[in-house]
């Protein structure tokens, strides 16, 4: 029987199952046997293997690091089960654990996970797992430890998402590993989303049909099928439209339809959670058609093609259209004098049905006449006409003619009837306040129709004989919509009186009133500070009702004694307020010393600014705590000026952080070794210099608009208990693509939290994101502490200064702020991140040309360092139609999958193998940021889309 291979360490046969070597001391493992070779823990270490004549295999490293710790197996290549193993500890006093290669696993709910934090010293004790913030692991977490493999976590749950560190003790001193960020994806609980572009299709016999079925699923583990009610169909094409492993478009094509193809067509999507389907209807016709029918309000009278309405009422004319092919031209024509319908007509499409509407406000007699709606397609045209008439109250006029006849002319619609009355005396009417007998006179009446004006005229003549006393004759014209009268008195002359008016006095009063309104308008237009964050109380579509922050409650639990607060240096300042660094004694726990940031007002602040600071305090207390917003820690509202105490973020704002780290990012990318061979060791990179990129459009003047937030050393008593999150160790690590993705993900998480709290930020930008310990991004609003009067990012518009280049089109032109407008601004923030702090729309001034570009759908080209997937997210955020922009939850899911594509993700994937000594090798796949050049260029292609935006 063949014996297992023999293992030697530096030419000495290994008698135990493990050996210990010193870091940077030569390591030589020799395997003696027939046709043998080595299997190291990491596949990239295979380059150190040399096989000699199939009888000996040598694994040799001159300067091993802690990452060479692991189990090495020597086996017969013809009989893989025949082998020997030895575990090598590469002992390093500075590193008790292997480095972990920035391991950020993404696993499914219920999966098991191995954290590769191998011990480098067999004498270590108390090997365990805890959270990066110092607290214990979640109560529901079940894990086991293996010094030679790491820590196994069983049955992962979404509640386990956090940063963890491995912990052990050597010589009584606790050592911890590099943090591991664990992400857990929930198992699918719902079927895939399935939807079709149209609910019905119409085709002419012989035409082709192409139906697109779009489906959404968190992964590719699902199926799309088609079904026709009367025939078997075949999927012609199925493509991944976005390349983000989420959206699939399945296309059904029928080259030439016939009448028998009429029927229902169903697209079905299924996954492990179930089935979802949607159906469309196909109608096949023999020839093109346009069918028109009139639709009127029930209040309007209609007789055949004649429409009658009361004068002064509104008239709404509607036409329902069914047409195929699609309507290319349509409009209204009229014989009336009013023929400009640009502001009063509308035309809407519903698949192959259309609705045209014409609204005529306060109808007058001048708008009577024939109205025609016409529609044209590429192959056919049609029209419908109807006559509009207004019911007009009668008018009457009496004339004295030839000394013997009274003539009464009455106008109106319908034609009025005329009656004559005679009474004694001089009166305005014979039918009021009379005790005399009312005499009705016979007269000759003739009806005259006026086609041009659509009015009807009636003329009546009354012969008048000799009269011996004063007499009044009255002509009364009446119809179903009212009556009118006119009287003529005989033998009576009446002087008309004219009331004098004080024209000059009225004109003077009007002038002073206009002057007062102009002065008031100028006062209102003066830019004033207002808090950007808004809390939604109720919504109707995009019409939001916001809560007045002053009406929010304030809990006295936030009060903190002023005497226990020691103020330090100014971190940022504006016209009316500032933020200072401070030390809080006893915040949260007794004798606890915490570095905090304190926002306060300057003595020059007005009542509006004081109210704004109180509003900001109430909003922060209303929102509650979240990892990715700058959280409220306390406040001082009694016995002095208002002080708002928040978390201190030692790395300052994200914008300056990116600019300061820009050259380290470029240096890291330019000098990056082969991703399959090495992993960059951050701890040896030392950066003490602030870099300004001369080729990026960034200069020192860019920071003049507001004071940069940067770390300030804080001296505290040596005996004080300083929390871990307040350490002042300088961040000398370089910037890499993973950092940019994490910033993007964390900001999206913070904005998703604000959305859940019905809060709209309204100023999402890199300057309003701060970086705390471990480079955790937190959303804030500098507000009073920024000098927006001198900040070129804020442009005067109306009575406020606004960050126009970050604002969505509906916010710029319609003054509409919604969660979707925050999504647009988030897309601009992504552009800032992946351009390493460049200003958006570089070299473009905010003027009429800029506004026209935004209206026309212009989108910035991909920034220098953005992966294509991130640029796709940016373009999704910049959709001119707000409802088509993704939610922050959707954005978080997309970025989360990019963060999950790590090179060592598959190490020790099969942790339940029966052979405990066999370890799967590390995957050879390069990380995503190494696959392409950082200098990729993309031609600017402005995206032109139609819109109806107007300036507000």
Image (spheres, rainbow, N blue to C red):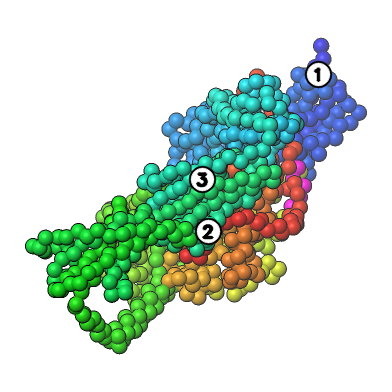
Precedes in sequence: disc 1 or disc 2: 1
Q: Residue furthest left?
A: 435
Report the magenta stretch's main SS: loop
The residue tagged 1 is 79
Which mark is in front, 2 or 3? Answer: 2
Residue depicted at x 76% and y 42%: 676
Q: Is residue 115 visible?
A: no
Position of 460 relative to 893 (above/below): below
How far apart marks 3 and 1 lie (CA) works out to 83 Å
Residue at the image point whose x is 22% and y is 69% from the top: 465
Residue at the (81%, 31%) spot, across then down = 30
Residue 335's label in the rendered image is 2
Q: Magenta segment: does it hold 82?
A: no
Residues at marks 2 and 3, CA–CA distance in whole angstroms: 18 Å
The numbered dot on residue 319 is 3
Horizontal and vertical percent position of residue 636: 30, 62
Q: Is residue 674 magenta?
A: yes
At 78% across and 41% down in the image, what residue appears?
61
Segment tinted magenta in the rendering? 672-676
The crowd level at tag 3 (other Cα within 10 Å; few <14, some 14-19, many 20+) is some
- The answer to which of 650 and 627 lies nearer the viewer is 627
């Amino acid at each position: 029987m063949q014996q297992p291979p023999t293992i030697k360490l530096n030419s000495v046969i290994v008698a135990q199952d493990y050996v210990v070597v010193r870091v940077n001391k030569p390591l030589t493992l020799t395997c003696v046997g027939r046709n043998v070779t080595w299997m190291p823990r990491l596949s990239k270490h295979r380059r150190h293997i040399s096989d000699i004549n199939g009888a000996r295999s040598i694994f040799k490293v001159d300067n091993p690091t802690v990452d060479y710790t692991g189990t090495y197996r020597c086996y017969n290549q013809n009989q893989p089960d025949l082998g020997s193993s030895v575990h090598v500890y590469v002992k390093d006093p500075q590193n008790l654990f292997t480095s972990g290669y920035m391991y950020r696993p993404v696993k499914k709910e219920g999966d098991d996970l191995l954290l590769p934090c191998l011990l480098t010293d067999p004498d270590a004790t108390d090997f365990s797992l805890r959270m990066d913030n110092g607290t214990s692991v979640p109560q529901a977490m079940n894990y086991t430890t293996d010094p030679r493999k790491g820590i196994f976590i069983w049955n992962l749950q979404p509640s386990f998402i956090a940063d963890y560190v491995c912990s052990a003790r050597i010589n009584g001193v606790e050592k911890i590993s590099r943090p591991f960020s664990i992400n857990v994806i929930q198992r699918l609980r719902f079927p895939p989303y399935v939807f079709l572009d149209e609910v019905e299709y119409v085709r002419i016999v012989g035409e082709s049909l192409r139906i697109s079925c779009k489906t959404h699923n968190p992964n590719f583990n699902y199926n799309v099928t088609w079904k026709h009610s009367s025939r078997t169909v075949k999927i012609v094409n199925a493509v991944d439209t976005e390349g983000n492993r989420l959206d699939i478009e399945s296309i059904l094509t029928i080259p030439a339809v016939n009448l028998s193809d009429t029927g229902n067509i169903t697209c079905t999507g299924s996954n492990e959670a179930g089935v979802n389907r949607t159906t469309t209807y196909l109608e096949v016709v023999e020839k093109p058609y346009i069918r028109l029918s009139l639709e009127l309000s029930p209040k309007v009278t209609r007789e055949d093609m004649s429409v009658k309405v009361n004068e002064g009422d509104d008239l709404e004319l509607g036409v329902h259209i069914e047409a195929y092919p699609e309507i290319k031209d349509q409009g209204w024509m009229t014989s009336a004098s009013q023929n400009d319908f640009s502001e009063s007509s509308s035309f809407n499409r519903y698949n192959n049905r259309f609705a045209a509407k014409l609204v005529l406000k306060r109808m007058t007699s001048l708008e009577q006449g024939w109205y025609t709606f016409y529609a044209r397609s590429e192959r056919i045209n049609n029209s419908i006409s109807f006559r509009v008439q207004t019911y007009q109250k009668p008018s009457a006029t009496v004339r004295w003619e030839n000394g013997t006849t009274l003539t009464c002319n009455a106008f109106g619609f319908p034609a009025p009837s005329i009656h004559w009355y005679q009474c004694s005396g001089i009166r305005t009417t014979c039918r009021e306040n009379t005790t005399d007998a009312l005499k009705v006179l016979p007269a000759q009446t003739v009806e005259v129709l006026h086609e041009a004006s659509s009015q009807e005229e009636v003329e009546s003549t009354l012969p008048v004989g000799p009269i011996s006393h004063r007499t009044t004759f009255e002509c009364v014209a009446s119809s179903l919509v009212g009556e009118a009268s006119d009287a003529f008195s005989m033998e009576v002359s009446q002087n008309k009186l004219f009331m004098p008016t004080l024209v000059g006095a009225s004109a003077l009063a009007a002038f002073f009133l206009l002057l007062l309104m102009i002065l008031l308008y100028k006062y209102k237009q003066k830019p004033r500070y207002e808090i950007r964050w808004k809390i939604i109380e109720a919504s109707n579509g995009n019409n939001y009702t916001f809560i007045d922050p002053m009406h929010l409650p304030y809990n006295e639990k936030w009060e903190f004694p002023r005497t226990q607060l020691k103020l330090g240096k100014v971190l940022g300042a504006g016209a009316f307020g500032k933020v200072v660094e401070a030390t809080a004694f006893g915040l949260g726990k007794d004798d606890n010393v915490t570095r905090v940031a304190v926002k306060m007002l300057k003595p020059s602040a007005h009542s509006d600014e004081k109210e704004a600071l109180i509003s900001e305090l109430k909003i922060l207390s209303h929102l509650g705590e979240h990892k990715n917003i700058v959280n409220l820690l306390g406040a001082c509202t009694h016995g002095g000026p208002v002080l708002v105490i928040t978390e201190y973020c030692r790395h300052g704002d994200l914008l300056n952080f990116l600019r300061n780290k820009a050259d380290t990012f470029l240096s890291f990318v330019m000098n990056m070794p082969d991703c399959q061979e090495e992993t960059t060791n951050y701890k040896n990179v030392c950066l003490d210099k602030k870099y300004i990129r001369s080729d990026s459009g960034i200069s020192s003047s860019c920071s003049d608009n507001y004071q940069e937030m940067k770390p300030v050393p804080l001296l505290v008593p040596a005996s004080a208990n300083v929390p871990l999150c307040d350490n002042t160790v300088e961040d000398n690590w370089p910037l890499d693509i993973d950092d940019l993705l994490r910033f993007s993900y964390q900001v999206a998480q913070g904005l998703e939290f604000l959305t859940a709290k019905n809060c709209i930020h309204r100023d999402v930008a890199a300057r309003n994101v701060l970086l705390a310990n471990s480079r955790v991004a937190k959303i804030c609003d500098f507000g009073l502490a920024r000098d927006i009067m001198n900040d070129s990012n804020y442009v005067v518009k109306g009575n406020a200064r606004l960050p126009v280049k970050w604002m969505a089109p509906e916010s710029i032109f319609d003054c509409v702020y919604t969660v979707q407008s925050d999504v647009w601004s988030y897309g601009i923030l992504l552009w800032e991140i992946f351009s390493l702090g460049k200003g958006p729309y570089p070299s473009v001034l905010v003027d009429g040309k800029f506004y026209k570009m935004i209206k026309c759908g212009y989108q910035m080209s991909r920034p220098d360092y953005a992966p294509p997937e991130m640029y796709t997210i940016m373009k999704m955020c910049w959709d001119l139609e707000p409802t088509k922009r993704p939610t922050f939850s959707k954005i978080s899911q997309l970025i989360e999958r990019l963060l999950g594509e790590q090179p060592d993700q598959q190490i020790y994937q099969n942790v339940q193998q029966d052979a405990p000594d066999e370890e799967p090798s590390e995957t050879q796949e390069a990380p995503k940021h190494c696959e392409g050049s950082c200098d990729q260029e993309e031609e600017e292609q402005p995206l032109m889309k139609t819109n109806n935006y107007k300036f507000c």
